[in-house]
Amino acid sequence: MSEGAARNERLIGFLEALAAACLWASSGIFAVHLFRLGTPPESVALLRPLVGVGFLAVGFALTRPSALRATRTELIVLGLGGGTAVGVFQIAYQLSTDAVGVPTTVALLYLAPAVVVAASGPLLGEWPTGRRVALVMLTLVGVWLTVLGAEDVPATFGTSGVAWGVLAAVAYATYTLFGRFATPRYGSAKTVLYSTAGACVVLAVLLPLSPAPLTLPSGAAAWGLLIAFGALTIAAAQLLFFDALGRVEASGASIATAAEPAVAAVLATVLLSQGLEPSGWLGIALVVAGVVGVGITARASRR
């Protein structure tokens, strides 16, 4: 591949990861509204990917039927490996959101880029440069300032909530690394479809172990929220993110998704009149600087 084509690939991948982050920025709003409408977090964790898998399966059946055909090896690697990482992330994210709220969950979740940068070298052979490490630190500081700088939305730290939030961050980093490994080998379509389907199986096994029974949404409004939640933040966002992992390094894609809390804060300010303290706007500026820095300095991975 020529250098020009490689640059275009990296740019497309970076923009895909950024688009996925923008879609994920709405996750907390969807989840909190579903909780208030009577759907518990354990049920949301299972129903959300189920809806996403439905959209993915129908879409691929109509546009890319070959993505539905998988070998036994692909089913094991993608369904079991990817499914476990995605499933654990889904349940940990929802339980953390329910326990300590969106701000704390997001702050803890974006410890993931640091984990990805630390692990991508020994696991994937994508050793980060000093500049990439500095951009990760800059972005993490920006995320925390953005989250903690929200007016009237204080972060609340509790033992169980922090534990679930940290687990969500580790699972998020794990499936980012897994996606970078699997997507170039199996393609983004198969990776996202069977990883998400595997997550549904994992969650279906884990859900009966929780004290809360499976509760379906009640009413058209709750069902509409759930369908939009799954379509946007699972089907569309996951497909964009896994395709991005086929084009750029895991660390670069992970830092790009750190734009999520900044986008969420801006949306809350514009749409919900939930403003930011000066420290929050400083955090957004740092996140933007880190994400733009990754876009400028991204380079093809070398194995």
Image (cartoon, rainbow, N blue to C red):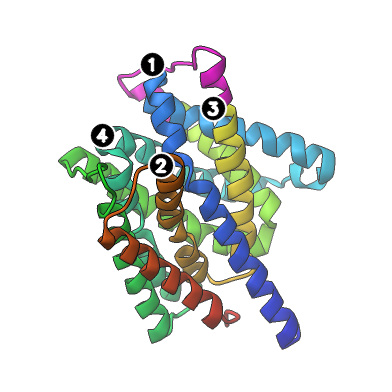
The mark that comes first in sequence, 4 or 2, is 2
Instruction: Look at 63% across and 35% down and name the residue there.
Output: 53
The magenta span reads 205-225
| Alpha carbon separation for disc pair 4 and 2 | 16 Å
The residue carrying mark 1 is 213
Question: Which residue matches tag 4?
Answer: 99
Most foreground residue, 54 or 151: 151
For the view shown, which residue lies furthest in the top direction?
A: 219
Name the mark on residue 88. 2
Task: Using a 10 Å C-alpha cutoff, classify the residue at mark 3 as few (fewer than 14 neighbours), some (14 to 19) or many (20 or more).
Answer: many
Image position, residue 290 (x, y; %)? 42, 73
Residue at horizontal 20%, vertical 38%?
160
Classify mark 4: helix, strand or loop: helix
- The residue type indicated by label 4 comes to Ala
In the rendered structure, find residue 226 and report the number of the disc placed on it: 3
Q: Is residue 67 above or below residue 224?
A: below
